[in-house]
Amino acid sequence: MSLLLVIILAALSWLAFHDWQLPNALRYRPFQGRVWRSSFPSASRKDIREFLSVFGAAFSFGDSDKLHLRPDDQVLGVVRAARSARWMPDASDIEPLARALRERYGLRLDEVWHDGLTLGGLFQRVQQARGKSAV
């Protein structure tokens, strides 16, 4: 009985630890701040960090993990990588992001969504919704 309890606790610990981190392919990239700044030179660092924080929080990524994301990463690709246990993400995987964007920026994700949407494209739409230039 105690062996079963240890196995269950170990499995739960492993799931809890791996759920809030980026997948290995993204986590071990160098920080991407320069890529964001060169892609969006008129956007402030604060705006970029805030956007990445909102995106990362929607998927329970750690604070430093968001800095590994690139503007050319596809939103659906990041979600797929983060939820690798399932082959295809569904609406429930995207809903936390949609809610966060609506609450923080007044942006409706369903109005801008397409399967090839990148983080950079989403950031550009966020900046437009805020009345700021992204490029």
Image (cartoon, rainbow, N blue to C red):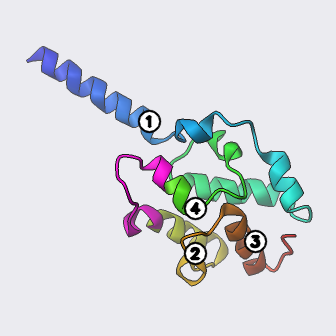
Q: Which residue is mark 4?
A: 75
Q: CA distance from mark 1 to mark 4?
A: 19 Å
Q: Which residues are magenta?
A: 80-94
Q: CA distance from mark 3 to mark 4?
A: 13 Å
Three-letter code, disc 1: His
Q: Is residue 60 above or below residue 72?
A: above
Tag 3 and tag 4, C-beta contact below 8 Å? no
Instruction: Indicate yes or no whether the magenta region holds residue 90.
Output: yes
Residue 113 lies, in percent from the top left, at 56, 76
Mark yes or no: residue 58 visible. no
Determine which of the numbered discs, if any, sits on residue 18 in the image: 1
Q: Which residue is mark 3?
A: 124
| Viewer-side residue, 102 vs 109 | 109
Secondary structure, mark 4, is: helix
Residue at image point 54% right, 71% down: 115
Three-letter code, disc 2: Arg
Q: Is residue 44 above or below residue 6?
A: below
For the residues carrying marks 3 and 4, which lies nearer the camera in this image?
4
Query: Could you tell which of marks 3 and 4 lies nearer the N-terminus?
Result: 4
Q: Which residue is mark 2?
A: 102
Q: CA distance from mark 3 to mark 1?
A: 30 Å
Secondary structure, mark 2, is: helix
Secondary structure, mark 3, is: helix
Residue 123 lies, in percent from the top left, at 72, 67
Kindly give the residue lying farthest to the right in the view shown.
42
Tag 3 and tag 2, C-beta contact below 8 Å? no
Residue 122 lies, in percent from the top left, at 67, 69
